[in-house]
Image: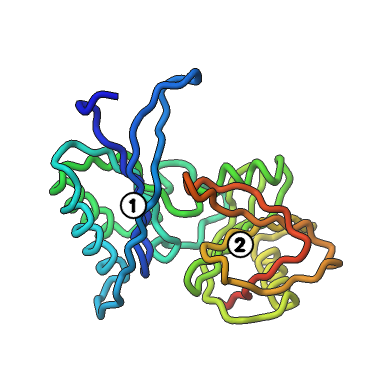
Amino acid sequence: MSDLWPELLRITLCPDQVILERGKLVVSRAGVEPRYFEPEVVPVEPRHEPALWAAPLAVLGIILDGLPERPHDASVILSNHFVRYPFVNGANASEPDCAANLVEEALQRALNESLQQHQCRLASLQPRIVTLGEAVADELQSEPGWLVAIEQGLASIGLVQDGDFIHFRNMHMWPASSVELLSVLDRESFAAGLKNPPRNLVLWMRDESDEVFMPLKSGWQITRLGEEPTTAAPHRKPLRQVSLAGARA
């Protein structure tokens, strides 16, 4: 593609790190599609700020300062730490208006200002849960099930029915047994008004070191989602024994 085309940026904002992937549009037999290169992971030093997102946004500004002076189109993924849950039953996080309502207005405004200062157009703003949605739907194959997404001390637990998230919320984590985790899911089933709770569980863990063991004979169908090193796109990892941290409201 010509340099006249905007450079593509995929930015992931987390409390402890900012991930930048630079990319471009390429022409293939399938048409024009984005291709991203090796991600750059920049740690964020903790700061005493009223807003948890202030420090990573400051780091993002420094990263953008180092980019070439040319137009960019930025797709931003937000850690679940920066998203307001729970969903109201029936809400669909994949709908743009719903996703925007889940993100604090001050964060949206500050992010837009930072990007505009660096010739970046905000092409999309998505909570982490939305980026996992396609892989989760592919795994569940229209069956109801649970998603548990874990990142930096937070467990985000979601119920999927008919391809949509209809019940979702964040919980603080602590090392716990599978019995406690399953008890949490039972409570979430009750809160969602389910008479026959699903026993399909899809796990996503940002860090490979996050572990809690679930028994082989638990009566649950368990799959773990990972990330391809080259594209950061979720892919499936079938599990024989899964380790997962428990959750606390």
In this picture, residue 3 sits left or right of residue 198: left
Amino acid bearing label 1: Leu
Q: Which residue is mark 1?
A: 20
The location of residue 22, given as percent across then percent down, is: 32, 43
3 with respect to 232 (left or right): left
Say which element carries label 2: strand
Q: Is residue 71 above or below residue 50?
A: above
Q: Which residue is mark 2?
A: 148
Which mark lies nearer to you, 2 or 1?
1
Q: Nearer the viewer, residue 246 or 5?
A: 5
Give the SS element for disc 1.
strand
Query: Looking at the figure, which quarter contains the C terminus?
Result: bottom right
Labels 2 and 1: the sequence-earlier one: 1
User: Which label number is shown at residue 201?
Assistant: none
Label 2 to label 1: alpha-carbon separation: 25 Å
Q: Residue at x 65, y 60 (%)?
A: 192
